[in-house]
Amino acid sequence: MTLLDDGASPAATHKHVGTRPIRHDGMDKVIGKARYGADEVLPEMLEGAFLRSPHAHARILSIDTARAAEMPGVKAIVTGSDFPRLPLDHPEETLSQNLMARDKVFYDGHPIAAVAATSSKLARKAVDAIVVEYEVLPHVLTVDEAMAEGAPILHEHLRTKNPAIQDDAPTNVHNRTFFEKGNIDAGFANAQVDIERTFTTKVVHQGYIEPHAAVADTGQDGRSTIWCSSQGHFKVRAMTASLLGWEPSRIKVIPAEIGGGFGGKTNIYLEPIAVLLSQKSGRPVRLVMSRDEVFRSTGPTPGAKVVIRIGASSDGKITAAKADLVFESGAFPGPWAMIACLTCWSAYDIDNAQVEGFDVVVNKPRAIPYRAPGSPQAAFGVESVMDEIARELAIDPLELRLRNAATKGTRTLHGVELPIVGAVDTLEAVRSTEHYSLPLGPNQGRGVAIGYWGNMGAASSATVNLNEDGTVIVITGSPDIGGSRASMALMAAEEFGIDVYQIQPIVGDTESVGFTDVTEGSRATFATGMAVVEASRKVVAVLCQRAAQMWNVDAATVSWLDGKAHHLSSDDRTPLSLQEITRQAHSTGGPIGETASVNAAGAGPAYATHVCDVEVDPETGQIAILRYTTAQDAGTAIHPSYVEGQMQGGVVQGIGWALNEEYIHNGQGILENPSFLDYRIPVASDLPMIETIIIEVPNPNHPYGVRGVGEVGIVPPLAAIANAVRDATGKRLYDLPMSPPRVLEAITGSE
Amino acid sequence: MTLLDDGASPAATHKHVGTRPIRHDGMDKVIGKARYGADEVLPEMLEGAFLRSPHAHARILSIDTARAAEMPGVKAIVTGSDFPRLPLDHPEETLSQNLMARDKVFYDGHPIAAVAATSSKLARKAVDAIVVEYEVLPHVLTVDEAMAEGAPILHEHLRTKNPAIQDDAPTNVHNRTFFEKGNIDAGFANAQVDIERTFTTKVVHQGYIEPHAAVADTGQDGRSTIWCSSQGHFKVRAMTASLLGWEPSRIKVIPAEIGGGFGGKTNIYLEPIAVLLSQKSGRPVRLVMSRDEVFRSTGPTPGAKVVIRIGASSDGKITAAKADLVFESGAFPGPWAMIACLTCWSAYDIDNAQVEGFDVVVNKPRAIPYRAPGSPQAAFGVESVMDEIARELAIDPLELRLRNAATKGTRTLHGVELPIVGAVDTLEAVRSTEHYSLPLGPNQGRGVAIGYWGNMGAASSATVNLNEDGTVIVITGSPDIGGSRASMALMAAEEFGIDVYQIQPIVGDTESVGFTDVTEGSRATFATGMAVVEASRKVVAVLCQRAAQMWNVDAATVSWLDGKAHHLSSDDRTPLSLQEITRQAHSTGGPIGETASVNAAGAGPAYATHVCDVEVDPETGQIAILRYTTAQDAGTAIHPSYVEGQMQGGVVQGIGWALNEEYIHNGQGILENPSFLDYRIPVASDLPMIETIIIEVPNPNHPYGVRGVGEVGIVPPLAAIANAVRDATGKRLYDLPMSPPRVLEAITGSE
């Protein structure tokens, strides 16, 4: 890693991959020229405003927009009835119900109507003039309330998805997941130490800086162009089409720059509404959310109730492990507990283990992905109990984890055999840091935790075109969220053997590059990178053919090295540079460009080990993060600075989740803190410099060994901090966030 | 051709090529939604204005912009000194001098400075405040003046390009072209009839409706984005880069829709200036020309003096032909006489012929291409003399041309052997029309003429991507000037065997598709079409592979027919549609897309034969076009309606050139008619419906036999109308335009 700090390459064989050039899009972003979702301005453009539910759960008896429609400047109004009802088994059915309420509202902030007018002010005035009759219904906010006997039912049609469950009664439990391995009863019987604890985490928001924004311009030809910031404009096109009942090809989505997503911009809230408002008004329409709307109606990530039981032998080998995971999926079904079941025990090699998960609907906003969705809530419980086991057995907590760490060949509960992974490497890297060995002062404590995330592949496309001046255009369909332009350019620079600034990485719209899946699951550098490398290699092959033509030799005798075509057998031919070949391209067969598409398999699982020092103020319960170090397996760090940025970002969001962030609902189920003033995310002054250690255990399934680095960093912090607080105070907190009042109660109250 | 009129396919084998769907971009253009060069609006955008020379020829002693720079709203000013001086042998050197005058101004309207301000009004005010000291120089306006002894010299460094000419004295004659074949002295000796005449044509303008416009946004990163309408945005990028001394890759050009070009938008006048003004001001800058500026400073096509001598035997076989062609290239050297030398005699198979051409600079705007540049001026002379020969020998003028028509194997003067061509077919088609046999009334006359144009190939690229809904995106780099979106979509529809509206033809910017040459020489449907067909065939091959995968059979056993993959050997497999395959694309290897680039050779020469009836008012000299029929060899008509539109457009522009259009300069060399009021192009009420006969002699070098149809239509009208006037009045006009005063003089004056 010191190797990386001076900007050198991690692998001696790489000239460009592993270096730290300034990102191509950096200048525009620094000087404010980069255009985000709300920056698009079209002639005659209208502004929009939303009417949202003031109730957590209510039946809509009537919506009267007549007066609003007559108000000055109002050009169009849409309600749920303007959208087709999708069949219950349609994959986007809940997205459609969430877009705009129809018969019922399911949470405070659920959209009911939208108005487009000549100004935002007039649009908001018209919204106030819309009259809605409600029949308020009892609501549920927690999984316990939702699963209780006789609990109010959100969706009458909902049944628990699980063959084992035959009960045909309506329920709020829409999914049960169960995996097991070995025999946990026998395992617990052989345990010298056996600890079970219950943990809860609250709903938190992805907290990106840029609110959702979309501009749509729908023509009389029935086609619409959408400008918006998202994590995947092809998915925006597909989802918008589904919700409108259109063919995707009627829609063109032009990606704006994106001011943060973290999973929160994989779903849509505005686009189909903007398209319809534009169609009705015959003018372009812009919809921009306020922060209040972002909190009440978008994201968040589910709260959870987690029961973890671990048994271990005296030498610290886990003999049995059991997890019961119950997740709030918000107003509509979601797969969160199911995903948590896949990640819960994957950091360890355990013979006897079991996990059961329930996904439960409650009257809160529809939960969507947030950085390694599901994994942090489960890891909070698992890694906290591991810490108690270590204390009980007086074994160093890293040593305990090393004795149980997953390695190549470990079988997960869901029956997958792990490929080569870096779990042990990250544990050892942290153990050997100066940080881990430093003494602590009064009221100070140290905690560690490990986290796992599986990462993803999926579909990506790339087109590579050569300019006549010898520069290379690399077009991909992945929005640049965390520096992907730079990563794509570095891999292309490596393939072509030219300077990274001779590469122009372009994010293409849905009509200028092939289909590319949404940027999630840490897949962009892995999958889109594969497409870039494949397209680049096709182009290099053409360059060699062209050089052979110029030399009038057999193409098989030409090879590509350091940006030049070399003739193998004869020394009398001076190598031809990329520029020399492109200058001649017209006379050797025309311009040079190639495309490639992949459906990438073989994403490499990622592990991260964190160590955290805290100091707890005994009088206020305030927790200060003194020092924080993270070691994470990146596979290969294409651009180490942006890998470190992802590692640090994950930690910081984990710190917020652990210490302060939470949705606070009142008795009526109304969100009481929908602003960054009352919903407290960490600010720079709350944080030390997060120290990063990049571990590189290359992923054999990627040409450069990429694993994906975006998500796993948020998994360990919740437990690492809780373990440090336990170390500092002797008291363990089982419920997040560990805000000063809770901490004070814990350290003053009796255990 | 009747076959085509009902929208049926010209070739039984084609389902889509040869039909007449409404163009994909039609709706946007009809309802005014299509965005042209001047429609781009950016936040903080400045407006520009130009200072232009009030003199035809003058030395610039000084330019003082100090006061202008201080004026309200003014943000940036540029003059010639802001641009690098290109070496005299640089291909864009004259373009650079034409962009902005440096030491000298060479014509009325030559740009001297440009201002960017917060409004057009303020920019124009600032322009008025710029002080320029001139030393006015004597000027030359005609080739005779320019070639006279002791004529004022425009460019001291200019020497005549020709090995035969050793004279090292400065001259206005920059180029001499000479071709000969056989022995013309012997040829003329054997002639029974021998006629020589001298003809002149005036400078005329392309007369497109949309004035030039460009918006540039130059960032602090030294890169600039340009929105403009042009005939080729890759060439705009290349020319702008040359004139700025930049690498092309620093510039991105986004094509706007284009409101007509006809050759006049193959060159640039605004873009590098907008880029610099934007760089100096740090804000986007828009430059939009007035019609006055378009006439004074852009285009036009050269005036010419043409001496034609033809000898023929009594049976009408041409025994010898000689042409002397002198072209005004405006203020800077151009290849116009040289091109005219290549086309002059190419309609005929002549044993003894000679052509000599001189390109001469005069103090008029720099001439640039206009529809078949050079050819109409020469054909005016050749086809007029052919008419006199026919009268002299009392041979039907079409019969005379048929006896001498070029055919496969004919050797041109410049030594090219013609491939299969449609000259004879177009002559016979006209001869067999009802039009040609109808009787004429008093003061009425009929004239015929044939025209030739060689057409072009050059470099084009295309990318074809498949949407998940089974529609096809076809991206090309050719602006849609005459319906190319429809043509590209039709060829792709034919390749895929799906409905043309399932194809989305996209014009990509310079960063979303491979390099594509400018649209000129009637090359777009030919060359860009080849790239589209090649890319489509690559995609079809992939579709067959994917189908084979889905069927788990050998790809060699799968073929593509009517939009479906068919399994050859077994009937038990239902054919898979494109949509069924794309829906599965993710699981069969990812999205599907391919690119192709060509440097197209083998463009097919085009011929057109026209017949025209006129009536001449003996009292006013006013000429009315009574009826006009054109037969033209399209090779294959991809979209017959747009082929007919090109044929009609060429005729109409030829009629304007023949009857009314001319640049009128006063004694000081100032253009006196720079507006559509005083420069009269034909309006609908001047014209009959132009009758079209599409001849299809397929070009063997194109997958669908395309030749290119944009240009040849303007070649015959000048002579066809002059011949009709001769037929109606007994008087021949040798000088264009045949405006009422000239006609009156001819028919009242003595021959």
Image (spheres, coloured by chain):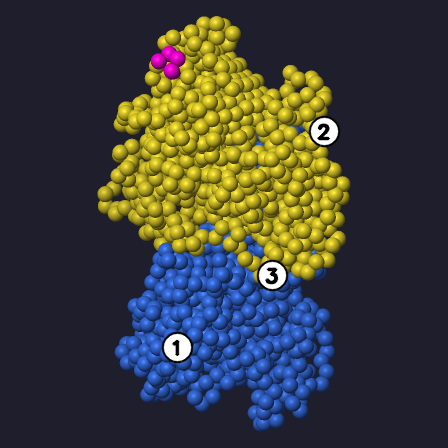
Chain colours: A yellow, B blue
Mark 1 — on which chain does it sit? B
Q: Is residue B269 placed above or below B701 in the rendered structure?
A: below
Residue A710: x percent and y percent? Answer: 43, 35
Q: Is residue A393 magenta?
A: yes
Picture coordinates of residue B592, whole percent (x, y)? 53, 39
- In which quadrant of the rendered view does residue B631 lie? bottom right
- Stretch in magenta: A390-394
Front: mark 2 or 3? 2
- The residue at 39%/21% (across/down) is A730
* Badge 3 and badge 1 in a common chain: no
Name the residue carrying label 1.
Answer: B68
Report which quarter residue B331 is drawn in. Answer: bottom left
Question: Dividing the image into 4 quarters, which one contains the N terminus of chain B?
Answer: bottom right
Q: Do labels 2 and 3 share a chain?
A: yes
Classed neighbour count for the residue bearing mark 2: other residues with Cα under 10 Å, few (<14), some (14–19), many (≥20): few
Q: Which residue is drawn at 68% across and 25% down?
A: A151
